Image (tube, rainbow, N blue to C red):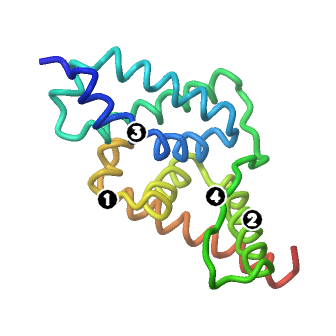
Amino acid sequence: MQMDTNRFKQDILPLKNKLYRFACSILSDTDEAQDAVQEVFMRLWNNRKKLEELNSPEAFAMTVTRNYCLDRIKARRTVSIEQTQSLKRTETGDEGPERIAEMKDTAKYLRRLMEELPEQQKAVLHMRDIEGYGFEEIGEVLDMNINAIRVNLSRARKKIRELYLNTVEHGY
């Protein structure tokens, strides 16, 4: 049975922001990430018959996004280190403007540090710590076993921690 338009709008389109953030984490370019998400939605629409049969259409959408983004990286043959992804505005009444600016700077810096990680570690760290995926879901999307995910996550966190602490000790 093929997924109809209403079901696609209900189940797949709400993933737009999550797919966009994931594409940004891989591509490090907001415009290219938007293009990637549009292409992924086209591919998902064209494969809507398959979507209906899947246990987790979301995991499939993440996998399609990952594969498309990696293909884009291979096509351009150079990976941009510069992070152009902007943060969402912090909407809190408790934080003053200085604290909000400091938090944004720290988050931006941590994203730049993430760019130094190998692709697999970066993807695992993003999916687990930013998107909140479980180990099983990450394994399904990245085609990895849980032990490999844990090792990659541990190494990624350790590397980020080391780089960050080194910077804090020696200044930005």
**Marks 1 & 4, CB-CB < 8 Å contact:** no
Front residue of 118/172: it is: 172
What secondary structure is found at the residue carrying circle 2? helix
The three-letter code of the residue at mark 1 reads Phe
Q: Tell us which disc is closer to us: 2 or 4.
A: 4
Q: Which residue is mark 4?
A: 88
- Could you say which disc has been placed on residue 135 in the image? 1
Q: Tell us which disc is closer to us: 2 or 1.
A: 2
What secondary structure is found at the residue carrying circle 4? loop
Label 1 or label 4, whichever comes before in sequence order = 4
Measured in 3D between alpha carbons, the distance from the residue under mark 2 to the one under mark 4, in whole angstroms, is: 15 Å
Q: Which residue is mark 2?
A: 109
Determine the residue positioned at 40% across, 61% down. 132
Measured in 3D between alpha carbons, the distance from the residue under mark 3 to the one under mark 1, in whole angstroms, is: 14 Å
Label 2 or label 4, whichever comes before in sequence order = 4
- Could you say which disc has been placed on residue 62 in the image? 3
Measured in 3D between alpha carbons, the distance from the residue under mark 4 to the one under mark 3, in whole angstroms, is: 21 Å
Label 2 or label 3, whichever comes before in sequence order = 3
Q: Tell us which disc is closer to us: 4 or 3.
A: 4
Crowding at dot 2, Cα within 10 Å, few <14 / some 14-19 / many 20+, comes out as some
The three-letter code of the residue at mark 3 reads Met
Percent across and percent down for residue 38 are: 52, 25
The three-letter code of the residue at mark 4 reads Lys
Determine the residue positioned at 39% across, 41% down. 14
